[in-house]
Image (tube, rainbow, N blue to C red):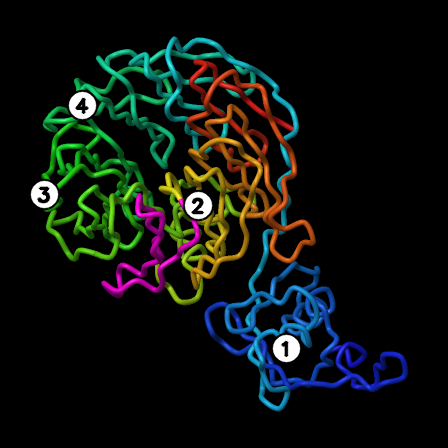
Amino acid sequence: EVQQSELRMAETVEGQPVGCIFAQFTSPGGEATGPQIEIPLDLNTKKLNGVINELLGNERSEPYSFYINDQEVAGTLELALDEQCLSTEDVIKIIYQPQATFRVVAVTRCSGTLPGHTEAILCVAFSPDCQRLLTGSGDATLRIWDLKTETPIVTLKGHKNWVLCCAVSPDGTLAASGSMDKTARIWDFKTGASMGGPLSGHSKWITSLAWEPIHASADGQSRRMVTASKDASLKVWDARTGRMEFTMTGHMSSVTSVRWGGQGLIFSGSEDRTIKVWDPIKGILCRSLDGHAHWVNHIALSTDHAMRNAPPNPKQAALSPQQRYDDALGGDGVERMVSASDDHTMYLWEPSKSKKPICRMTGHVQPINHVSFSPNGRLIASASFDKAIRIWNGVTGKYLATLRGHVGAVYQVAWSSDSRLLVSASKDSTIKLWDVEQGSKTFGKLKVDLPGHADEVFAVDWSSDGSRVASGSKDCSLKLWRY
C-alpha cells in the first residue's frame, strides 16, 4: 500500500483542510504506473518523490523530476495547476522522469595550462574513456594529451592548413580531423599514426565531420564517417580503408554542420538556409527542412551525448550502446534536432517524422553560433554573438532562462553528464560555469567564473566522467579545469 500518510486529506494548513486531486502517475513512455490515487495539493517534489518511489517499489529512493503537460513541477502541485489554469476536478496526469543518480561537481580551478600548439586551438574533444584529449589547431597539427599526467602524448602532423574540426571515434580507437587544406585524415588514436593518406575529394575546406554511432555499425567497430565541406557536398568514408563510399549533393551553398543520427539518417545544415536529411546506406536525399531565413550555423541532436559512447558511471557502462541510445531517446522513441541560424532564431524538429518544425525559438538578438542538448534531452542551450546563453525546454522548445555574464560573443557550450551544469566559452577570454539544475532555486545563475586565458576561447568540452573541463584558446594554450 502507498503510504497513506503521504496521501491523506487530513493534512491541514493553519487549520484549513488541504484540497486533493486525483492523479495518474505516468512513465516517460506513457504507461500508467499504479492506479489513480488521491493526493493533497500541497505535495512538493520531495514528497512526490516519496510517492513515486513507493509506487514503483524501489528499495532505494531514486530521484525523479515531475511534469504536467511538459511543464516541470517546481513548487507544489497547487502552484503547478494554478500556473496552467487546470481544474482540480480532472484526473491530472503526472509524468515522472528519472534524474541522474550521480552528481557532477563544478570545476573551480585550472589544474594545468598546456603549451605546445603555435596557433589558436579550434577544437577539443575528450576520448570516450576520458583518459585522453584530442585538440586541433590553426598550426595545422593535432595533439593527443594524456589527462592523468597532463602532458602531450603525440603530435599528429600531415595537414597543410588549419585544422577546423576533429572527433574521436565512439569506440575510442580512431580520430578524424578536417582541415582548410580540403582533406580529412584518419589517425590511430592509440599511437597517433596516420591511417593511410589524406581523404581527398572535396574541392573546398572541411567544415564539420561526424562518426557513425557505434550501435548502428555492423561489427561494433567505428568504421564509417561523414565529412561536410564548403563545396556544398557531403562524403561518406570507410575510415578503416580510406575508401570514399559516396558523395551526397543537394545543398546549394557551404555545409556548416553535420550529425549522424542513431536511426539511420544523416543531417546537415547549410548556408543555403536548409537542413537536409540523408540516407547513409544509399547516399540519397530523404527530405529537406526549410524555415530559416539565413545561414544555418549549427545543428544538434537530443541523442548526441549517448552517441559519444562515453558512459558517465559503471551503472551506465554495464549497458550496451543500443540500450544507452534507447534510454536517451525516451518514451516517444523520437530523435529531436535543433538548428541555430544567423537569422537569430532556432527551430526544433522531429526530422524522422515530419518536415514541419515543432516550434520556432526566438529571443536572441544576434546570430547563434552553437546549440547543444543536455545529456538527458530535457534542455537545450544556445550560444550567441549577443553575449547571452539561452536555455530552452528540449521537448517543447519553450524558453526557460537567459544566462548573462559574458561581455563578448559566446562561441561554444558543453554540458556536464548529469545535465545540471553548463560551461561556456567566449570571446571575452573567460569560460563560465552555470547552474542549470531544473527545479533548483539558483537555476540560470552563474556558479563559477573561470578567467585565465589571455585571448578568445574558441572551444570547450566536458569529460563524461565529470572530472575535467578542457578549453582551447586563441592564446595557443590548452587549459584543463578541475574541482
Q: Position of residue 208 (x, y in %)?
A: 27, 34
Q: Residues within 10 Å of mark 4 (few under 14, many from 20)?
A: many
Looking at this view, name the residue that lies furthest to the bottom. Answer: 89
| Residue type, label 4 | Thr
* Residue topped by disc 1: 82
Residue 370 appears in which quarter of the rendering? Answer: top left
Q: Where is residue 158 in the image (x, y as percent from the top left)?
A: 24, 12
User: Of tags 1 and 4, which is closer to the observer?
Assistant: 1
Looking at this view, name the residue that lies furthest to the right. Answer: 15
For the residue pair 92 and 129, the one nearer the viewer reads as 92
Q: Position of residue 73 (x, y in %)?
A: 62, 67
Q: Which mark is residue 183?
A: 4
* Quadrant in which the C terminus appears: top right
Give the main secondary structure of the magenta stretch: loop
* Residue topped by disc 2: 382
Per the rendered image, the range of residues in magenta is: 336-365
Q: Residues within 10 Å of mark 2 (few under 14, many from 20)?
A: many
| Residue type, label 3 | Thr
Q: Which mark is residue 249?
A: 3
Helix, strand or loop for disc 2: strand
